[in-house]
Image (cartoon, helix red, strand yellow):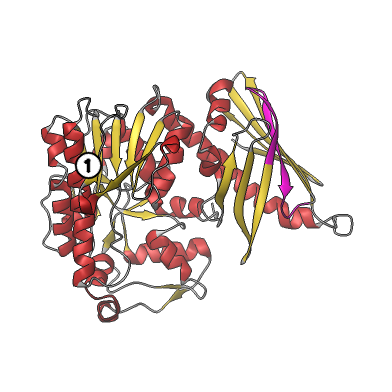
Amino acid sequence: MISFNTAPGSFSAATVFPCGVEELYNWHSRPGALDRLIPPWERTTVAARSGGIDPGGRVTMRMHAGPVPYLWRAHHIENVPNVYFRDIQASGPFKRWVHTHSFTETSEGARLKDHINYALPLHFLFPWAGKLLVEPVLTRTFRYRHATLADDLFLHGYASKRPLRILISGASGVLGSALIPLLTTGGHEVWRLVRRQPRRSEREIYWNPARGLLNLAGLPAFDGVIHLAADNIGEGRWTEEKKQRMIDSRVQGTSLLAQELARCEQKPAVLLSASAVGFYGDCQDCCIIEENQAGSAFISDVCSRWEQAARPAEDAGIRTVSLRIGVVLTPRGGALARLLSTSALGFSRRFGSGEQYISWIGLHDAVGAMLHVLVSPELQGPLNIVAPQPVTNRELLATLAQVMRRPLLPPVPAAVVRLVFGQMGAEVLLDGCRASADKLMSSGYRFRHPDLRTALGTMLGRA
């Protein structure tokens, strides 16, 4: 349970976690910790960093005050391992900002206390400004940070018992950029496949699927591979050129990677290869399990080819899992980001009939499930990566409107969706799929956000 303590120019948040002080400190000291703790509703990104949390370490973040962007620069000035570390604002919106992260052993576990001493410009003229402007933001932020940390520590408690070396494609996408910090804070070593000049010091490997270029020879052996790279299906109309690009980006990349992994002298134990619940096509309200056959839609054919392209790895004895991922909800990209971008007046009541089911999953559960699958040897073959409570299009939009405190606007008729978006609109917005999460849950995965309201409230800072 998190507790808060405030006074003029001072803010504290404290939580006791069921782990040891060393484990709690180590999580904070590893690459990716800051990325994991940035609330998803904030338009904040890490622009540059060096030196970790030791004295001399520096971080620059791109942030926003409403629509106005600015840079926040922080310097780490003190670090006593397993006791505390401290950073200060070097430049940014505050006159003074000192953040101390302290760790204390208790009879119930390790206590983390985040204490911030701050002052706003002209604070002597407006002494009330901190309580009005700063404290609500800090309370919301640290409630999110401590809850995310608790969930991460629980997952790492069984999934990160030994460090793994993991190769990832699609590292810069919405899923990849969230997955990598989760892995590195668990102590895992991550290598990336990139299509530009690689920086070997940053564990990057060049590949070009269109030209069949990938060489894994001479590299250390990988424990697991997570393949996420693919063209975005939800952007723009599906022209013939776009449809071919959707197929090629999935089949060429997956085939090349699977074949190269099969040739490795020391093969990885597992390959997780992305797919989508679009495999099943339009299923109306039927509850779909992994044994169901592919649908007849274009996207079903794309997913079927995508999964078949991973067969060389499976034939080589590598445990291969086709991740049939649902609609990943995050304000940082994808469907939810597009809905939020048009929400100034409100949200449409429904698209088409509104009765089509949406198999969704929150971003943290999507990447958390991947780490879980990586270390669960009983899981193989197709696997639905979806939340246990799918909702209709009507329910999703109504819940989003309630969480965001926006009105519901008139529905968008199916004919308008087809006219504006063509085949993409018909298959992505109007078709439905009610996929089951039973296989994932039966393997022991514990969802952070099993219901839609909790997921949206957490991701949008409205919990």
Q: Residue at x 63, y 30 (%)?
A: 112
Q: Residue at x 23, y 46 (%)?
A: 213
Residue type at numbered disc 1: Leu
Q: Residue at x 17, y 57 (%)?
A: 302
Q: Nearer the viewer, residue 317 or 395?
A: 317
Indicate the secondary structure of the residue bearing disc 1.
helix
Residue lying furthest top in this view? Answer: 107
Q: Nearer the viewer, residue 296 or 72?
A: 72
Q: Is residue 124 visible?
A: yes
**Residue 310 percent location from the top left of the image:** 16, 43
**Residue 324 percent location from the top left of the image:** 24, 48
Neighbourhood count class around disc 1 (C-alpha, 10 Å): few under 14, some 14–19, many 20 upward: many
What residue span does the magenta drawing correspond to? Answer: 75-94
Q: Nearer the viewer, residue 380 or 183?
A: 183
Residue 418 falls in image quadrant: bottom left
Q: Identify the residue position indicated by label 1 in the image.
A: 257
Q: Is residue 285 visible?
A: no
Depicted 11 relative to depicted 174: above or below? above
Q: Residue at x 32, y 65 (%)?
A: 393
**Residue 275 percent location from the top left of the image:** 23, 50
Q: Nearer the viewer, residue 462 or 173?
A: 173
Depicted 45 relative to depicted 265: above or below? below
Depicted 315 relative to depicted 245: above or below? above
Residue 184 falls in image quadrant: top left
* The N terminus - image quarter: top right
Lateral position of residue 356 relative to residue 310, left or right: right
Depicted 164 relative to depicted 329: above or below? above
**Residue 193 percent location from the top left of the image:** 33, 43
Residue 81 part of the magenta-drawn span: yes
